[in-house]
Amino acid sequence: MLQDVLCHMQDKSLSLQSEPKFLPYHRLVPRTLTKPRPKRGAHLADLRHAAGISQIDLARAIGETQQNVAYWEQSEYPPRADVIPKIAKALGVRIEQIIDPETAPPSPLRAGPVGRVGKAFHEVSRLPRRQQNKIIEIVEAFVAQHTRKAG
């Protein structure tokens, strides 16, 4: 009897070792969806993509976690009422577009870049965060210098 149990355990351990090993999840590589997104979550993800920001950037802008943003994009449930205005502001859309995606047209509040400065800052927004911060420091220094001279 004991010998049968040991043989069975040995067979089990051999079958477990032969299973394929899974690579660890890498946070920069998104997982493929196993089921389609609900309409509300897909709409929120579309608005975020149209704004050109990542889930992490949106989470930082609204003071939430990336996991919450991912949940809202995978869920049929809307974000909490206290977060919806923050999301709308961060994405540059009206609150109605987030609350009811079917009745609100998907047009953003802000238009594209206007003038040379607007176009330049639009291109700067595509740079890595560290380079963006350096450019902001330089521009803020110029603006501060100009306001001191004007005042």
Image (cartoon, rainbow, N blue to C red):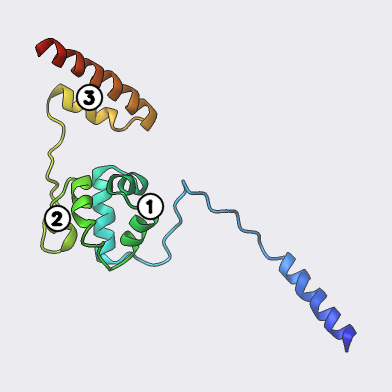
Residue 111 percent across, percent down from the top left: 12, 38
Amino acid marked by disc 1 = Gln
Does dot 1 land on a helix, a strand or a loop? Answer: helix
Residue at 24% over, 58% down: 43
Does dot 2 land on a helix, a strand or a loop? Answer: helix
- Which tag is nearer the camera, tag 1 or tag 3? 1
Query: As drawn, is 31 to the left or to the right of 136?
Result: right
Q: Name the residue under label 1.
A: 66
Query: As drawn, is 127 to the left or to the right of 103?
Result: right
Quadrant housing residue 99: bottom left
Q: Name the residue under label 2.
A: 95
Residue 83 percent across, percent down from the top left: 24, 56
**Whether residue 103 is situated above or below residue 124 in the rendered picture:** below
Q: Residues within 10 Å of mark 1 (few under 14, many from 20)?
A: some
Residue at 86% over, 85% down: 4
Query: N-terminal of the two: label 2 or label 3?
Result: 2
Q: In the depicted view, which residue is nearer to us: 66 or 41? A: 66
Amino acid marked by disc 2 = Ile
Q: Residue 29 carries which label?
A: none
Q: How many labels does the image show?
A: 3
Residue at 28% over, 45% down: 61
**Gap between marks 2 and 3 measured at Cα:** 28 Å
**Gap between marks 1 and 3 measured at Cα:** 29 Å
- Which tag is nearer the camera, tag 2 or tag 3? 2
Examine the rendering and report whether any part of residue 128 can be seen. no
Q: Name the residue under label 3.
A: 120
Residue at 22% over, 15% down: 142
Query: As drawn, is 137 to the left or to the right of 16?
Result: left
